[in-house]
Image (cartoon, grey):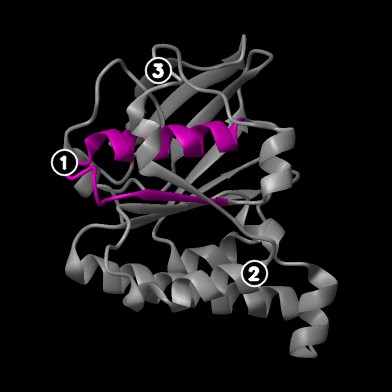
Amino acid sequence: MVVEAFFWRNRAQPPEEIEKLPNLLLLSGPPSCGKTSLLFQFAFNVAISLTNSTTSKVFFICNRHKLDSKPPFLSQGIDASSDVFNRIQMKYVNDDEDINKYFAAFHLYDVLPAAVIIDDFGDFFDNRICQERHCNPRGRDLAMVRSLALCHNAITYANQKGSCKLLLSDTYHGDSPRLHFIYKKWIPSILTIKEGDEGGSFILKDKSSSGTQNPERTKVAKYSIALQYLLLERIVEDQTG
């Protein structure tokens, strides 16, 4: 169910399916694998499922310069002028302090969002600035832990009032995602992206097996970015672990 939430299959997911998704998720993958497009599709899927569209919103947090230079691609079949996009509110931030301010004020909001999505979460933590701020060579790790704890507490509070999902994305280089040991403490559901066998194709895998009865069985989606579209090729059960 988790993997499906990142794609459009010519129908809206029922609200009850969205509510069953884990409250905290991480999408982790290499550069240029379509993470922002997947996040935006997730935002659209949550937004279209909202029954009270006049008040509920999905917040998409990102760096404006990065988004403008590399905008997300939509799935085929989605109208770019759809009113659903009015339920997605863009919030542009520059660093981790901006993120912390947003979540620190969560309890003051009259209407809590249905979902908060942060694109390239790790990129908001400048290594040198974090080291100076914490007077520690591992200042970036400490700053990330602080922000993740704040995010976790805010989303826990929100889910005492209703349903609110938090989705982060992170970019890793090479075969070993270095920061997963930090994320795992706060984010129970982690999805990873790897390059597929064919050029331009990618594999999205739910590493957490959340919601499945068999912990050895996971959902795998094969997709590509082509002709300025996010294209889902297939979703299958994967029992390789």
Give the distance between the C-alpha atoms of the residues marked 3 and 2, in whole angstroms: 32 Å
Which numbered disc flags the more N-terminal residue, 1 or 2?
Answer: 1
Report x, y in % for residue 35: 58, 37
Report x, y in % for residue 155: 34, 67
Do tag 3 and tag 1 residues touch (Cβ < 8 Å)?
A: no
Q: How many marks?
A: 3
Give the distance between the C-alpha atoms of the residues marked 3 and 1, in whole angstroms: 19 Å
Which numbered disc flags the more N-terminal residue, 3 or 2?
Answer: 3
Q: Is residue 54 visible?
A: yes
| Quadrant of res 132 | bottom right
Instruction: Name the amino acid type tagged 3.
Output: Ile
Instruction: Classify mark 3: helix, strand or loop.
Output: loop
Report x, y in % for residue 145: 57, 76
| Residue 96 image label | 2
Q: Which residues are the magenta region?
A: 34-61
Residue 189 left/right relative to 126: left
| Residue 51 image label | 1
Report x, y in % for residue 175: 70, 44
Position of the C terminus by quadrant: top left
Which of the pair 186/13 is nearer the observer?
Answer: 13
Instruction: Name the amino acid type tagged 2.
Output: Asp
Q: Is residue 137 visible?
A: no
Which numbered disc flags the more N-terminal residue, 3 or 1?
Answer: 1
- Asked whether 48 falls inside the magenta stretch, the response is yes
Instruction: Name the amino acid type tagged 1.
Output: Thr
| Quadrant of res 81 | top left
Dot 1 alpha-carbon crowd within 10 angstroms: few under 14, some 14 to 19, many 20 or more = few
The residue positioned 33% from the left and 42% from the top of the image is: 216
Image position of 56 with respect to 240: above or below:
below
Image position of 65 with respect to 196: above or below:
below
